[in-house]
Amino acid sequence: MPIFVPLHPRRDRRVRLLPSIRFGTERYPEKVARRLRVLNIATWSMTAPHAFWALVLFFDSTTRWHSIPNVVFALLFAGVPLLHRLSPLAGPVPGIFILYVDLFVLI
């Protein structure tokens, strides 16, 4: 008997397009994996506004060049979860560094 029976097949297809919160945390103990999942959510929540403002500023003809730092920081934040496979601290340390540089540059 299946554990999960999809009630709404259309909704289940859309959920598959969302990134997995457990990305890069499979081989760690639960305590470390929980911390890394929080980091994944935090970096994705920082990527979304940067990507949004990069698009908004790119389509504004007077401030087109202002979108470049937003694109760079969106890509850097999106890449932090990829560092989990190196070590448990390979993601958080660059993530904090990128956050401080982001606050210094964009504010």
Image (cartoon, helix red, strand yellow):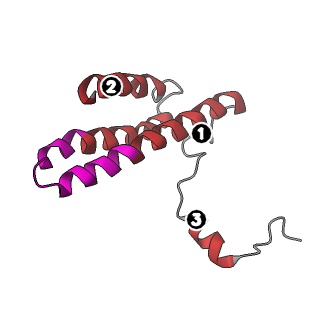
Residue type, label 2:
Leu
- Image height check: is 5 above or below 26? below
Q: Quadrant of residue 55?
A: bottom left
SS for callout 3: helix
Name the amino acid, label 3. Arg
Q: Which mark is residue 2?
A: none
Pointer 2 local density, CA inside 10 Å: few below 14, some 14–19, many at least 20: few
Question: Quick one: 84 or 14, which is closer to the camera?
Answer: 14
Q: Which one is in front in this view, the residue at disc 2 or the one at disc 1?
A: 2
- The mark nearer the N terminus, 1 or 3, is 3
Q: Residue furthest bottom?
A: 9
Confirm or deny contact between disc 2 and disc 1 (CB under 8 A).
Answer: no
Which residue is under mark 3? 16
The residue stretch that appears in magenta: 49-69
Tag of residue 25: 1
Comes first in the chain, label 3 or label 2: 3
Local SS, label 1: loop
Q: Which residue is mark 2?
A: 103
Q: x%, y% of residue 86?
A: 46, 32
User: In the image as oriented, which residue stretches furthest toward the right?
Assistant: 1
Q: Measure how far apart labels 1 and 3 are at the Cα level.
A: 18 Å
